Amino acid sequence: MNPDIHSLVGAYALDALDDLERAAFDRHLRDCEPCRIEADELRETATRLAADAWSVPPPSLRDAVLATVAETRQLGPAAARPARRTPRRLWWVAAAAAVLAAVGAGTVVWAIQDQRVRREQTLAAILTAPDVTWHEQSLLSGGRVRVATSTSRDAGVIMLDAERAPAAGKVYQLWTIRSGVPVSAGALGAGQSVSTQVVNDLPTANAVGVTVEQAPAAETPSTPLEAQVDLT
């Protein structure tokens, strides 16, 4: 997927973003009229494509749908070309129609919602665990990172809420640090400043780090770190 924040408009229209991602995209929509127009058009298109097509799909179709989505390239719009949005919208509709023709409109909606529900259930299980522990640290450039860990769930959640996205060509990247050895926990997309990341085995880490890296990601963290949250 293109990491440009504009490319989230499809997931936004289908209500497939988590709460923090949706809040960030809502802020983006206040300043991006082309994305507002496209979000409205995609909602209308998705409604029409799914009309009278809902049925309970067999579980075996979920993997097929997600595999198709993963292989479908998504292109973000050029911010300076709001008057030429129609070709991209038509491409999105054509791609959606192809998937719908293969597995059914109801299955696409079901797969996206099922994926989101599973993710939210995992988040809720960690954040409401009786042994959940919270840690927080401010970012050098403004904002904060919060980390919740649960030994009973053997997992944790890293929640980044930066005041602004890094400069063009750079992204925020998350790291887990064990015995002084950093391992990437994922990078945000270009233009993104908010993220919620579930990380398995996080309670065994000594710290969580946040850096600004050249897009799309780095193998080792740059210094100084934007933030280091000590977990021990």
Image (cartoon, rainbow, N blue to C red):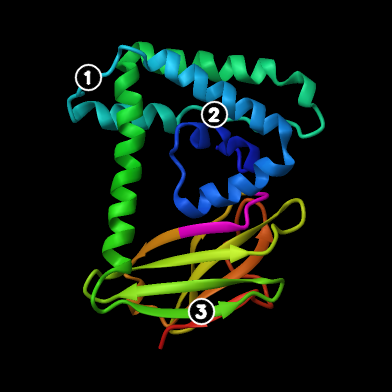
Position of the N terminus, as image quadrant, is top right
The mark lying in front, picked from 3 and 2, is 3
Give the residue pinned by disc 3. Answer: 136
Q: Return the residue at label 1.
A: 55
Residue 87 visible at all: yes
Mark sitting earlier along the chain (3/1): 1
Q: Camera-side residue: 129 or 73?
A: 129
Q: Is residue 135 above or below residue 85?
A: below
Residue drawn 53% across the image and 31% down it: 10
Question: Could you tell me the amino acid type at mark 3?
Answer: Glu
In x, y percent, where is residue 127? Answer: 33, 68
> Is residue 4 visible to us here?
no
Residue 10 is covered by the magenta coloring: no
Residue occupied by mark 2: 73
Mark seen at residue 196: none
Horizontal arrangement in the rendering, residue 63 relative to residue 216 (left or right)? left
